[in-house]
Amino acid sequence: MSRRRLAIAVVAVVLLVAALGLGALAWQRWSPPRSRLILADSDLALTGVSRPWRWIVVHHSATVSDTVDAMDREHRNKRGWDGIGYHFVIGNGKGQPLGEIRATWRWLDQREGAHAGIADYNQAGIGICLVGDCERNAPPSQQIERLAWLCANLIRLQPGLLPRPAVRLPQPEDHLAAIIGHRDVPGKATKCPGVHCDLRALRCRVAELLAPPAVTSATPP
Ligand SMILES: [Zn+2]
Protein backbone atom coordinates (compact mmCIF):
# COMPACT_ATOMS: atom_id res chain seq x y z
CA MET A 1 0.00 0.00 0.00
CA SER A 2 1.32 3.40 -0.91
CA ARG A 3 1.87 6.04 1.75
CA ARG A 4 -0.93 8.11 0.28
CA ARG A 5 -3.42 5.23 0.50
CA LEU A 6 -2.29 4.41 4.04
CA ALA A 7 -2.84 8.03 5.09
CA ILE A 8 -6.33 8.03 3.55
CA ALA A 9 -7.17 4.76 5.33
CA VAL A 10 -5.98 6.14 8.68
CA VAL A 11 -7.99 9.36 8.22
CA ALA A 12 -11.06 7.30 7.25
CA VAL A 13 -10.77 5.14 10.38
CA VAL A 14 -10.31 8.20 12.60
CA LEU A 15 -13.37 9.87 11.03
CA LEU A 16 -15.43 6.70 11.46
CA VAL A 17 -14.50 6.38 15.14
CA ALA A 18 -15.29 10.07 15.70
CA ALA A 19 -18.66 9.72 13.94
CA LEU A 20 -19.54 6.65 16.02
CA GLY A 21 -18.55 8.49 19.21
CA LEU A 22 -20.63 11.54 18.31
CA GLY A 23 -23.55 9.30 17.35
CA ALA A 24 -23.39 7.50 20.70
CA LEU A 25 -23.21 10.84 22.52
CA ALA A 26 -26.17 12.19 20.60
CA TRP A 27 -28.17 9.02 21.27
CA GLN A 28 -27.42 9.27 24.97
CA ARG A 29 -28.33 12.96 25.04
CA TRP A 30 -31.47 13.04 22.96
CA SER A 31 -32.89 9.53 23.08
CA PRO A 32 -36.13 9.24 25.05
CA PRO A 33 -35.64 7.94 28.60
CA ARG A 34 -36.56 4.41 29.50
CA SER A 35 -39.68 4.30 31.61
CA ARG A 36 -42.29 1.72 32.48
CA LEU A 37 -46.02 2.15 32.92
CA ILE A 38 -47.10 0.99 36.39
CA LEU A 39 -50.67 -0.25 36.43
CA ALA A 40 -50.67 -2.92 39.13
CA ASP A 41 -48.57 -3.91 42.13
CA SER A 42 -47.15 -6.75 40.01
CA ASP A 43 -45.63 -4.15 37.63
CA LEU A 44 -43.92 -2.57 40.60
CA ALA A 45 -42.67 -5.86 42.02
CA LEU A 46 -41.23 -6.79 38.62
CA THR A 47 -38.79 -3.91 38.77
CA GLY A 48 -37.14 -5.35 41.91
CA VAL A 49 -35.89 -3.38 44.91
CA SER A 50 -32.19 -3.53 45.70
CA ARG A 51 -31.50 -0.27 47.54
CA PRO A 52 -32.26 0.28 51.24
CA TRP A 53 -34.83 3.03 50.67
CA ARG A 54 -35.73 5.04 53.78
CA TRP A 55 -37.93 7.87 52.53
CA ILE A 56 -40.56 8.64 49.93
CA VAL A 57 -40.04 12.28 48.89
CA VAL A 58 -43.02 13.91 47.18
CA HIS A 59 -42.47 16.70 44.64
CA HIS A 60 -44.54 18.67 42.16
CA SER A 61 -43.30 19.68 38.72
CA ALA A 62 -44.35 23.33 39.32
CA THR A 63 -45.48 23.35 35.68
CA VAL A 64 -48.99 23.23 34.21
CA SER A 65 -48.22 20.21 32.03
CA ASP A 66 -45.29 17.83 31.74
CA THR A 67 -44.09 14.35 30.79
CA VAL A 68 -41.23 12.02 31.71
CA ASP A 69 -39.56 12.77 28.36
CA ALA A 70 -39.81 16.56 28.76
CA MET A 71 -38.46 16.44 32.32
CA ASP A 72 -35.66 14.15 31.22
CA ARG A 73 -34.62 16.62 28.51
CA GLU A 74 -34.81 19.53 30.91
CA HIS A 75 -32.75 17.82 33.60
CA ARG A 76 -30.10 16.77 31.06
CA ASN A 77 -29.86 20.01 29.12
CA LYS A 78 -30.46 22.68 31.74
CA ARG A 79 -29.14 21.03 34.91
CA GLY A 80 -26.46 18.83 33.38
CA TRP A 81 -27.73 15.68 35.14
CA ASP A 82 -27.64 12.20 33.65
CA GLY A 83 -31.40 12.29 33.08
CA ILE A 84 -34.66 12.81 34.92
CA GLY A 85 -34.01 13.16 38.65
CA TYR A 86 -37.21 11.42 39.89
CA HIS A 87 -37.97 7.73 40.27
CA PHE A 88 -41.67 8.06 39.45
CA VAL A 89 -43.87 10.61 37.70
CA ILE A 90 -47.68 10.73 38.09
CA GLY A 91 -49.65 12.56 35.39
CA ASN A 92 -52.34 15.21 35.90
CA GLY A 93 -53.98 14.80 32.49
CA LYS A 94 -51.92 17.56 30.90
CA GLY A 95 -49.08 16.01 28.92
CA GLN A 96 -49.23 12.71 30.81
CA PRO A 97 -52.62 11.00 31.32
CA LEU A 98 -54.40 11.70 34.61
CA GLY A 99 -53.24 9.30 37.31
CA GLU A 100 -50.81 7.49 35.02
CA ILE A 101 -47.76 6.28 36.98
CA ARG A 102 -44.47 5.93 35.14
CA ALA A 103 -41.37 4.45 36.73
CA THR A 104 -38.29 6.13 35.28
CA TRP A 105 -34.94 4.48 34.53
CA ARG A 106 -33.76 5.57 37.96
CA TRP A 107 -36.24 3.21 39.60
CA LEU A 108 -35.82 0.47 36.99
CA ASP A 109 -32.04 0.52 37.54
CA GLN A 110 -32.38 1.22 41.30
CA ARG A 111 -30.17 4.30 41.00
CA GLU A 112 -29.95 7.10 43.51
CA GLY A 113 -32.19 10.07 42.82
CA ALA A 114 -31.38 13.64 41.83
CA HIS A 115 -34.34 15.38 43.41
CA ALA A 116 -33.80 16.17 47.09
CA GLY A 117 -30.73 18.39 47.02
CA ILE A 118 -29.21 16.56 50.02
CA ALA A 119 -27.03 13.46 49.50
CA ASP A 120 -28.69 11.20 52.12
CA TYR A 121 -32.16 11.93 50.78
CA ASN A 122 -31.06 11.36 47.18
CA GLN A 123 -29.37 8.07 48.00
CA ALA A 124 -32.17 6.66 50.15
CA GLY A 125 -35.16 8.74 49.02
CA ILE A 126 -37.60 7.59 46.36
CA GLY A 127 -38.48 10.74 44.41
CA ILE A 128 -42.09 10.89 43.19
CA CYS A 129 -43.13 13.88 41.10
CA LEU A 130 -46.73 14.97 40.63
CA VAL A 131 -47.14 16.78 37.34
CA GLY A 132 -48.75 20.15 38.07
CA ASP A 133 -48.32 23.29 40.13
CA CYS A 134 -49.66 22.47 43.60
CA GLU A 135 -48.64 25.88 44.87
CA ARG A 136 -51.38 27.38 42.67
CA ASN A 137 -53.94 24.58 42.32
CA ALA A 138 -55.03 21.54 44.28
CA PRO A 139 -53.93 18.34 42.51
CA PRO A 140 -56.80 16.26 41.06
CA SER A 141 -58.12 13.66 43.52
CA GLN A 142 -57.38 10.83 41.05
CA GLN A 143 -53.72 11.87 40.96
CA ILE A 144 -53.48 11.87 44.78
CA GLU A 145 -55.28 8.52 44.98
CA ARG A 146 -52.69 7.00 42.61
CA LEU A 147 -49.92 8.59 44.68
CA ALA A 148 -51.36 6.97 47.83
CA TRP A 149 -51.60 3.63 46.01
CA LEU A 150 -47.99 3.91 44.87
CA CYS A 151 -46.76 4.82 48.39
CA ALA A 152 -48.66 1.89 49.94
CA ASN A 153 -47.22 -0.57 47.44
CA LEU A 154 -43.68 0.78 47.80
CA ILE A 155 -43.99 0.33 51.57
CA ARG A 156 -45.21 -3.25 51.07
CA LEU A 157 -42.16 -3.90 48.88
CA GLN A 158 -39.73 -2.16 51.19
CA PRO A 159 -40.64 -2.44 54.89
CA GLY A 160 -37.63 -0.23 55.68
CA LEU A 161 -39.94 2.65 54.79
CA LEU A 162 -41.96 1.98 57.93
CA PRO A 163 -40.63 3.48 61.16
CA ARG A 164 -39.19 1.35 63.94
CA PRO A 165 -42.14 -0.07 65.85
CA ALA A 166 -40.52 0.52 69.29
CA VAL A 167 -42.59 3.63 69.99
CA ARG A 168 -46.35 3.39 69.96
CA LEU A 169 -47.68 6.40 68.11
CA PRO A 170 -51.18 7.75 68.65
CA GLN A 171 -52.35 7.85 65.03
CA PRO A 172 -51.77 5.22 62.34
CA GLU A 173 -50.64 7.87 59.88
CA ASP A 174 -47.88 8.93 62.29
CA HIS A 175 -46.24 5.60 61.49
CA LEU A 176 -45.81 6.82 57.94
CA ALA A 177 -43.30 9.56 58.73
CA ALA A 178 -41.13 8.17 55.91
CA ILE A 179 -43.51 9.92 53.47
CA ILE A 180 -42.26 13.49 53.34
CA GLY A 181 -42.43 16.46 51.02
CA HIS A 182 -39.37 17.98 49.39
CA ARG A 183 -39.88 20.94 51.79
CA ASP A 184 -39.38 18.58 54.77
CA VAL A 185 -35.85 17.60 53.71
CA PRO A 186 -33.60 19.22 56.34
CA GLY A 187 -31.93 22.36 55.08
CA LYS A 188 -34.08 22.73 51.95
CA ALA A 189 -35.67 26.14 51.45
CA THR A 190 -38.41 25.12 49.04
CA LYS A 191 -42.21 25.11 49.01
CA CYS A 192 -42.25 21.92 46.91
CA PRO A 193 -44.62 20.07 46.58
CA GLY A 194 -46.78 23.15 47.07
CA VAL A 195 -49.25 24.42 49.68
CA HIS A 196 -52.15 22.46 48.14
CA CYS A 197 -50.38 19.10 48.49
CA ASP A 198 -51.77 17.81 51.80
CA LEU A 199 -49.21 15.29 53.02
CA ARG A 200 -51.03 14.50 56.27
CA ALA A 201 -54.14 13.54 54.30
CA LEU A 202 -51.89 11.48 52.03
CA ARG A 203 -50.39 9.60 55.00
CA CYS A 204 -53.90 8.92 56.37
CA ARG A 205 -54.98 7.48 53.01
CA VAL A 206 -51.84 5.33 52.77
CA ALA A 207 -52.49 4.07 56.33
CA GLU A 208 -56.02 3.08 55.23
CA LEU A 209 -54.67 1.22 52.19
CA LEU A 210 -52.11 -0.60 54.34
CA ALA A 211 -54.58 -1.53 57.08
CA PRO A 212 -55.68 -5.16 57.06
CA PRO A 213 -59.31 -5.64 55.95
CA ALA A 214 -61.83 -5.33 58.77
CA VAL A 215 -62.83 -8.66 60.31
CA THR A 216 -66.54 -9.29 59.84
CA SER A 217 -68.58 -11.30 62.29
CA ALA A 218 -68.82 -14.98 61.44
CA THR A 219 -72.23 -15.18 63.14
CA PRO A 220 -75.12 -14.68 60.75
CA PRO A 221 -77.60 -11.98 61.83
ZN1 LIG B 1 -39.22 19.15 44.71
Image: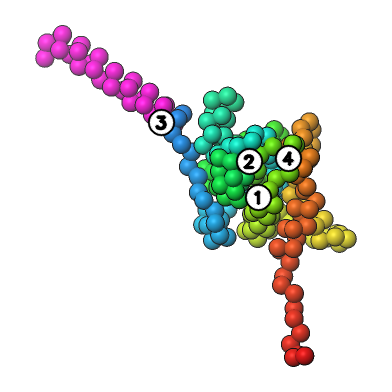
Mark 4 residue crowding within 10 angstroms, few (<14) / some (14–19) / many (20+): few
Which numbered disc flags the more N-terminal residue, 1 or 4? 4
Of all residues shown, which one is farthest toward the right?
170
What residue would you read off at disc 2?
131
Which numbered disc flags the more N-terminal residue, 4 or 2? 2
Residue 8 on the magenta segment: yes
SS assignment at label 3: helix
**Residue 121 visible to an observer of this rendering:** no
Q: Amino acid at mark 1?
A: Gln
Which numbered disc flags the more N-terminal residue, 2 or 1? 2
The answer to whether residue 30 is left or right of residue 156 is: left
What residue would you read off at disc 3?
27
Residue beneath the point at 72% across and 58% down = 206
Q: Amino acid at mark 4?
A: Asn
User: Which quadrant of the figure contains the N terminus?
Assistant: top left
- Mark number, residue 137: 4
Residue beneath the point at 80% across and 51% down = 200
Could you tell me how far apart the alpha carbons at marks 2 and 1 are, in whole angstroms? 9 Å
**Depth-wise, is mark 2 or mark 3 nearer the camera?**
2
